[in-house]
Image: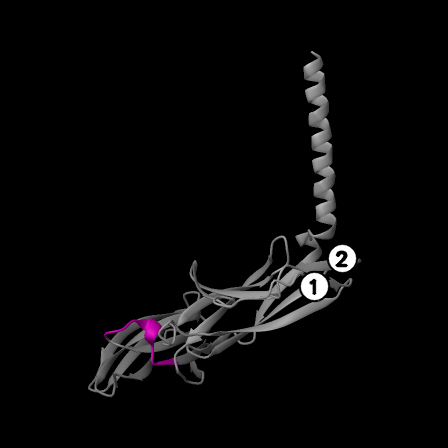
Amino acid sequence: MKHQYLLSAILVLFLTTGSLSAESYRKWEFVNPADLQITITPEKAELISGSVATFTITIRNRTNHTVNLHYPTGQQWDLAAYHGRTQIFRWSQGSIWADAPHTIPLKRGETRSEQLTWLTVDRNDTPLPHGIYSAHGMVMISPRHLVSNDCQIRLLPAEIKPVQIIETRLNQFFDIELPRYSGKRELEWHIDYVYNDNRIAIQSINRTADKVVVTFNPKRVGHVEFHLYAHHDTQDATRSLERRSFRVEVR
């Protein structure tokens, strides 16, 4: 019985000491994520594939007291970009930072920001496929880094045509004429609706000697926005040569 009491006393002492150590550890190193707001903002929501995408990462103290940010190395920021769920870029990859622990105080309401860039090419320096990509920023404090919200950018083909406005009436068909060839290679056209809500529909697609004629049927009153992407018939829309944008006003 005496051994049981002795074991219990040792266990209570151990748990108490461990709790105090953890509390002391958190006081000087742990930052409550709720005290900070981490955001990322792209400089441009759309840009030509193969160009440089720039992001601003910001950390803000949302409390009424100073928060100390502890960094274990010289690295303070990082950036990751994704296509779907696959990480395709990490700003810090291949870099080495000095083992230089340091602390930066962030006063109440104060913010710190940094701009990081991503060259939107693959490992062969070829412009990435067109489409939507996401990115998030990181603040590399210890004992664990903090991650921002996700933001999205769209990578576009090299040639972007200005928006064309078309005015039409309900049930009055209208045509859009597009080139059929780029040089000697035949083109395919892919439509991407920004906003439609079943207001217009494609009635037919006809090919002449040098043109593709797309006929639309206006079915409801309102406005519609869409893009048409041109790509070679042996490639898909993620390798488009150009984008043409339209806004249709159905009266």
Answer left or right for 20 relative to 249.
right
Residue 119 seen in the figure: yes
Q: Give above or below for 146 relative to 187.
A: above
State the image coordinates of residue 66 (x, y, percent, origin top left): 78, 59
Inspect the magenta stretch and tell me whether residue 242 lies in it: yes
Q: What are the residue bounds of the magenta stretch?
A: 234-243
Q: Nearer the viewer, residue 215 or 62?
A: 62
Q: Give above or below for 169 relative to 87.
A: below
Which residue is the site of mark 2? 63
Answer left or right for 175 relative to 163.
left
State the image coordinates of residue 116 (x, y, percent, origin top left): 56, 72
Q: Nearer the viewer, residue 101 or 207?
A: 101
Residue 222 seen in the figure: no
**Which amino acid does the dot numbered 1 rest on?**
Arg
Inter-mark Cα distance, 1 to 2: 9 Å
- Res 186 → quadrant: bottom left
**Which amino acid does the dot numbered 2 rest on?**
Thr
Which residue is the site of mark 1? 60
State the image coordinates of residue 230 (x, y, percent, origin top left): 32, 78
* Quarter of the picture holding the N terminus: top right
Inspect the magenta stretch and tell me whether residue 23 lies in it: no
- Res 132 → quadrant: bottom left
